[in-house]
Image (cartoon, rainbow, N blue to C red):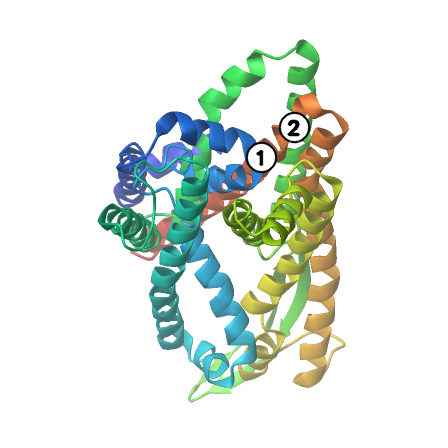
Amino acid sequence: MFESLLNAFRAPDIRRRIVFVLGILVVYRLLAQVPLPGIDREQLAQFFQDNTAFGILDLFAGGGLSSLSIVGLAMNPYINASIIMQLMTGVIPSLQALSREGEYGRQRLNQYTRYLTVPMALLQAFGILSALNADGVIIGGFGLGNGLSWVQMITLVAGAVLLMWLGELITEKGIGNGISFIIFAGIVSRAPAGAVALLQGGVRDIALFVIIAVAAVMVIIYIQEGQRRIPIQYASRVRGRRMYQGGQTFLPLRVNLAGVIPIIFAISILAFPGQLAAYFSFSEVEGVRAVAQAIGAFLSSTTIQYSILYFLLTVGFTYFYTAFTFKPDETAEQLRKNGGFIPGIRPGRPTQEYLARVVSRITLAGALFLGTVAVAPVIVGVLDPSLSGLAIGGTGLLIVVSVVVETMKQIEAQLMMRNYEGFIR
């Protein structure tokens, strides 16, 4: 890994990409230090100490939500918009047809996701500020008839749109996935404070955290690198006046095709009911207040039911995102057009069914591993309340390791491509 990084910095084009990413991340962290006006900071700190649902959202914001900065919403509106668009793509025929139109269709769907991010950010800003106002965090109150309230909401929406743009810049001109990098930077920024809190604990807590962290890193890397290689045979064929010799290669199918996206989606879905519960928990209607408080207690990140839901959502989103990114029918059609076939499997529909069956089986292994590693720190926190902070720290570790592994693979791919280009010259 270190050799790849050194080689990447020796290559001017890759070095520019890496420096560009670092520059964008510095801008993001500077924006996260700009506070929203009209906030009682002491009440805000007390609010986040008592609310685990908002604490998980603050994980993605890198502390920007707990300090209520102008980018306090972080990537949550964009993530929620992406989830909705992907669900709609699976059920709306016009969007499904658009998703099959290659680069043009992908750009149109991305544009729709950007449009949807704005109302999602506005809705989330209203919900968060309303919940904070009910707890006395907003100075002067919050309401649609208050000019300062509109300034606060528009500022949070603008911050979310700005982060979305910065993430797309990283994807386009840098290395890796921009959204994952923004979340990665937010989590890493909390590492020093987490390390200080961990060192204040006993030796037993430190040792247990190190064991869990090392085990999680090993499992995640094992999942990310694991793949099933399906042999592909190409027959000799003639095109025009040229004859192409046949050969044998393989189709690599990763055990976890979805990467870290299922974890991000699962946390976003789990945090949304907690947001609504926090908003209604101060309602003047006793029945509504009781239901909201019950939901908030039920979805606390230190409960067994939260671990079960987290596990099931992670497994479900792993299958969902894998189905969205890998389409056996398109792969089978491409093999048929290029004269390729799987030994022992007829081209066409039999190949499609075989690929779907193989992907389903290996995805099960990847989803179970990913779900188990995701909830293991939560379960440890339930069994030992003194380690309840692992519920958030373990999730952050999952995202950080996955992003690092994916980025290193992309850097190595860039280096390999550069070597091939030099060889051709």
In the picture provided, is 222 more to the left or to the right than 237? Answer: right
Residue type, mark 1 in image: Ile
Whole-percent x and y of residue 267? 57, 48
Residue 348 seen anywhere in this rendered image of the structure: yes
What's the residue at 64%, 51% (across, down)?
Answer: 291
Residue sitting nearer the eye, 188 or 241 = 188
Name the spot of residue 295 as percent of width and height, x first.
64, 48
Q: Which mark is residue 392?
A: 1
Q: Check disc 2 and give the amino acid type.
A: Ser
In front here: 382 or 280? 280
| Pointer 1 local density, CA inside 10 Å: few below 14, some 14–19, many at least 20 | many
Q: Is residue 116 above or below residue 36?
A: below
Residue at the image point whose x is 44% and y is 62% from the top: 81
Q: Which residue is mark 2?
A: 388
The residue depicted at 67 percent of the width and 35 percent of the height is 302
Q: Is residue 271 shown left or right of residue 424?
A: right
User: Residue 60: image x %, image y %?
Assistant: 46, 42
* Secondary-structure class at tag 1: helix
**Vertical placement of 355 versus 398: above or below?**
below
What whole-number distance in Å separates the C-alpha atoms at marks 1 and 2?
A: 8 Å
